[in-house]
Amino acid sequence: KSLVPSMLIFVRPRYSEKVLHPHLRWALWKKKSVFIPNASGIYRACLTDTEKETIKKHYLKKQKRLVVFFGFIYHHKGVELLFEIADPASDQIVIAGEVKDNGYFLRHITNLAYTAPWRDKVTITGFLSTDSLAALLSVADAVILPFRNGAGEWNTSIHAAVLNGAFVITTSLTQRGYDTKHNIYFAKIDDIAEMKSALATYSGTRRDYNAEIDRDEWREIADKHYWLYKEVLS
């Protein structure tokens, strides 16, 4: 697609400099590159306190802390690390998503979920509707997304968790530590100890209302695309 003379839109900042292979950068020569950030793929849940209490009790069962992973389940998402980061003495793990590898990886995840010390303390929901997923995120004590390639503002899953007020632990190649505004802790990739510490310190934290976050981001994205397409067509 980059060979077509046009404007290029990226969801990752400085994509051509940081991500694109140097041998391919020639294809972008003299082309206008525009960064338009991504946004959540689901809405924010609008629930009463009673509804939230009921939903959390449903998922939490007899445990004390609700730890969630959601999205498509691939090896590079680091899903199996939840079983090391979370504590079976207190945590209920909910994995909301479809396992895309029906071979070894699925067997590995189910083996961890259904044997000691995690037996009866893990729920694998499979696909959830957007309403059900938003509700789950709104009551989670922590959403853990330990991506092995590092995360960033291009990940719609992070936007979804932040929009629903959840505390998020994820990984990054460039950021480190706790982001108060977004209620995200950025850890080193595969650093179990750091993520365990973040979970112990910040679990249950809910971010404050922020006009920069709690807005109609997709309307802004649509407007930016509209004006760019108009510029190209003219």
Image (cartoon, grey):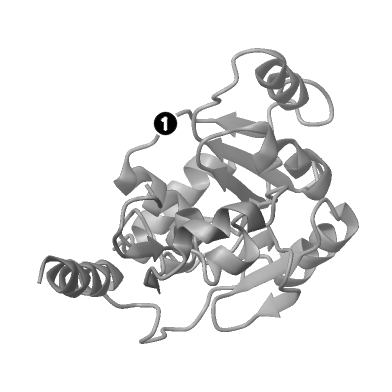
Q: Position of residue 110 (x, y in %)?
A: 69, 20
What residue sits right under mark 1 in the picture? 127
- Classify residue 195 as left or right of residue 95: right
Residue at x 79%, y 41% (from the top left corner): 88
In the displayed structure, would residue 78 be above or below residue 56?
A: above
- Classify residue 10 as left or right of residue 151: left
- Classify residue 31 as left or right of residue 169: left
Q: Is residue 36 visible?
A: no
**Picture quadrant of residue 223:** bottom left
Q: Can residue 165 be seen in this view?
A: yes
In the displayed structure, would residue 40 be above or below residue 68?
A: below
Total numbered badges shown on the rendered structure: 1
- Classify residue 100 as left or right of residue 53: right
Instruction: State the quadrant of the C terminus.
Output: bottom left
Query: Of all residues shown, which one is farthest toward the top?
Result: 103
In the displayed structure, would residue 144 be above or below residue 153?
A: above
Circle 1 sits in a helix, a strand or a loop, which is it? loop
**Picture quadrant of residue 41:** bottom left
Residue at x 83%, y 43% (from the top left corner): 84
Nearer to us in this view, 230 or 214: 230
Nearer to us in this view, 144 or 66: 144
Residue at x 45%, y 50% (from the top left corner): 136
In the displayed structure, would residue 207 be above or below residue 140?
A: below
Q: Where is residue 103 in the image (x, y as percent from the top left)?
A: 66, 12
Query: Of all residues shown, which one is farthest toward the bottom?
Result: 211
Q: Which amino acid does label 1 sit on?
A: Phe
Q: Where is residue 92 in the image (x, y as percent from the top left)?
A: 66, 42
Q: Where is residue 203 in the image (x, y as percent from the top left)?
A: 68, 65
Residue at x 65%, y 58% (from the top left corner): 22
Q: How crowded is mark 1: few (under 14 residues within 10 Å), some or many (20 or more)?
A: some
